[in-house]
Image (cartoon, rainbow, N blue to C red):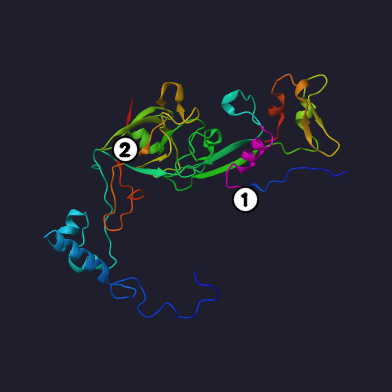
Amino acid sequence: MTKGPYEVKKLWGEKFGTKTGKFEFFSETLKKALEDHATKHNTTVDNVLEVTNYEARGELAFVPHYEPPRCWGDKSEYPFDLVDVKSRYNREGRSANLPFYNQFKVLDPGDKNWQDCIKINPVDAAGIGIADGDEVAVVSVVGEIKIKARLWEGVRPGTAVKTYGNGHWAYGRFASDYANLKETGGNNNEVMPDDYDRISGATARNGGFTGVKIVKI
Amino acid sequence: MAKYGMAVDLRKCVGCGACALACKTENNTKFERSGEKFNWADFYIHTEGTYAENNFKYQVFPVGCNHCTDAPCVENCPATPKALYKSADGLTLNIEENCIGCKKMSKSMPV
């Protein structure tokens, strides 16, 4: 950080940390990175794009462009997009053992106190024969969790909403059935595949990338 | 002597729960699970409409003591001597030793 007012255009003039030193609309930096990577592994840039699940080919990859979202699980078998939502009482993912987190859970719209649940729209629930408060299994291609289902009009049909941060089995008496080492609620990580945006390295958390089905137990 | 009351602009309430969190912390109430029998501060949650019709509404009303000037809970308290009373500075207060646990106060409350 520099002290005092910013001197106009001080950082202009090819001082960016890019290959050209400029802001790149066409990313020579990404092009070089992918070409070097392809050469190193004795293949082509298009092949690198294919195995890293990008649909762009050729020079389209180096300019801002649309990539369709990817979802784990076929829609016909896993009809709901899981929304991995933050409870308003969650600080990162470590609040499940705080008594007030559980005692005020009703203020997460659609939730109930002292309870972990998955929320779906009543229209969807009627379609799969689930009533408010039913015990359900939430199943994805990688795993399943067993929790209560809640019907909530605030959820867009086709999505299933669950706060993260629950499903502990040894975290304390408020977060789990500590005496029996038994979890309360479910851990979203059990059903979310380990997937990333390969170029940025970002987790694919908010893209609706997990397809789930909800089955009454 | 000052007269106290409670003024809450419900149009601005976003239902964050900070009022009840502060109340329970300040008054050192027990946790819900540890045998607390009544809520010192609670919420009334109102919903109407549906997603399909694009008119779903969700509103949270904090339910705390408003310290009414003419408090129906004090009037309807059947205990002798009364557990509830109005203090000189306008607060509605409870003497726990006199309380018989009839819950008439919560039924008397204006909603």
Relative placement, left or right, of B95 versus A176 is right
* Res A160 label: none
Q: Quadrant location of residue A41? A: bottom left
- The picture places residue A37, in percent across and down from the top left corner, at 19, 61
* Res B12 label: 1
* Vertical relation: B52 (above or below) A17: above
Q: Which residues are magenta?
A: B12-28
Front disc: 2 or 1: 2
Residues marked 2 and 1, same chain: no
Residue beneath disc 2: A191
**Residue A137 among those drawn in magenta:** no
Please report the residue visible at 31 percent of the width from the left and 38 percent of the height from the top: A191
Report in which chain the residue with disc 2 lies.
A
- The picture places residue A80, in percent across and down from the top left corner, at 32, 41
Please report the residue visible at 74 percent of the width from the left and 43 percent of the height from the top: B6
Relative placement, left or right, of A105 versus B74 is left
- The picture places residue B104, in percent across and down from the top left corner, at 71, 24
* Vertical relation: A27 (above or below) A186: below
Q: Quadrant location of residue A43? A: bottom left
Mark 1 packing: few (<14 Cα in 10 Å), some, or many (20+)?
Answer: few
Please report the residue visible at 18 percent of the width from the left and 54 percent of the height from the top: A51
Report in which chain the residue with disc 1 lies.
B
